[in-house]
Amino acid sequence: MLTRRIIACLDVRDGRVVKGVQFVDLVDAGDPAALAHRHAQEGADEIVLLDITATHEGRATLLDTVRRTAQSLFVPFTVGGGIRTAADAEAVFEAGADKVSINSAALADPDLIGQIGASFGAQAVIVAIDARRDVNASDPVRNARVFTHGGRKDAARTAVEWAREAESRGAGEILLTSMDSDGTRAGFDCELTAAVSSAVRIPVIASGGAGTVGHFADVFGAGKADAALAASIFHFGVSSARSLKQKLAQLGIPVRLPC
């Protein structure tokens, strides 16, 4: 069985890490470089930094923040937000990222996925999907809607169909965030994650709703996720990645235990 990854996420606004519930009511969580270093030391397999207002504000990623955060890391580092062209991606890689996450720009120009992959490899391209269940659909899960610009705009696509297209265009991974579960600590949307995971062959990272060890066990099992991402439980001391992994290992879930 493949080792499951635990990923710590840093949502950054104005150079500071913030966290909210369902993409709103953001509160300050600290300095990105300091938090990234702490989470890596505590056993996180990877760090993801998302400049969450870059696209909405029509600007590029805050490269100074990326550089400062990358200097303190010894685990894979993904950066997203404000990456609209292959040149933007190159600048982020040069600032210290190992992977890039693209969302709104990939929907606007799906060819961007292959363009970045051609230069840096498919493994370095993550397509992020922010999705919300469609309560008016006959199947709210399989018809979950994709949103862009930090959850502000309906992309008129379903998560399942867009994940399939992203894979066909060369994405190396899918970062799937349930907007309904985000920040609630009530559990990942395992049904949505399983629907997307079953539709593609590339790894799917589950995001949104992490609160307990059981939630991670559920998304790795019923949700069929290859990795799980969390933010607030790490930032605010609910759990460390090390403690989480030790408990998951006791449940028989294959994780890489930190030294």
Image (cartoon, helix red, strand yellow):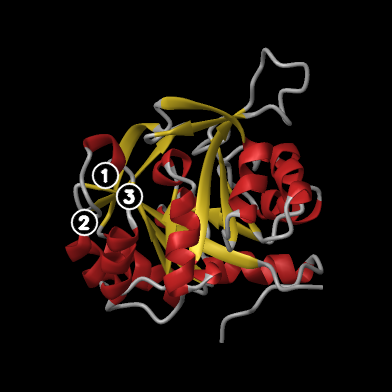
Q: Earlier in the sequence, mark 2 or mark 1?
A: 1
Mark 2 element type:
loop
Q: Residue 89 vs residue 158: left or right?
A: left
Identify residue type, mark 2.
Answer: Leu
Q: How crowded is mark 2: few (under 14 residues within 10 Å), some or many (20 or more)?
A: some
At horizontal 45% and vertical 78% (from top left) the residue drawn is: 75
Q: Earlier in the sequence, mark 1 or mark 3?
A: 1
Whole-Å distance between the Cαs marked 3 and 2? 13 Å
Q: Earlier in the sequence, mark 3 or mark 2?
A: 2
Q: Quadrant of the N terminus?
A: bottom right
Identify residue type, mark 1.
Answer: Ala
Identify residue type, mark 3.
Answer: Arg
**Residue occupied by mark 2:** 62
Could you say which quadrant of the image residue 101 lies in?
bottom left
Mark 3 element type:
loop
At horizontal 41% and vertical 82% (from top left) the residue drawn is: 74
Q: Residue 41 appears at what percent x and percent y?
A: 43, 77
* Residue 142 showing in the rendered view: yes
Q: Residue 115 appears at what percent x and percent y?
A: 44, 61
Q: Do the residues labelled 2 and 1 touch (CB within 8 Å)?
A: yes
Mark 1 element type:
helix
**Residue occupied by mark 1:** 54
Whole-Å distance between the Cαs marked 1 and 3? 10 Å
**Residue occupied by mark 3:** 84
Of the two numbered discs 1 and 3 in the rendering, the one whose residue sits closer to the viewer:
3
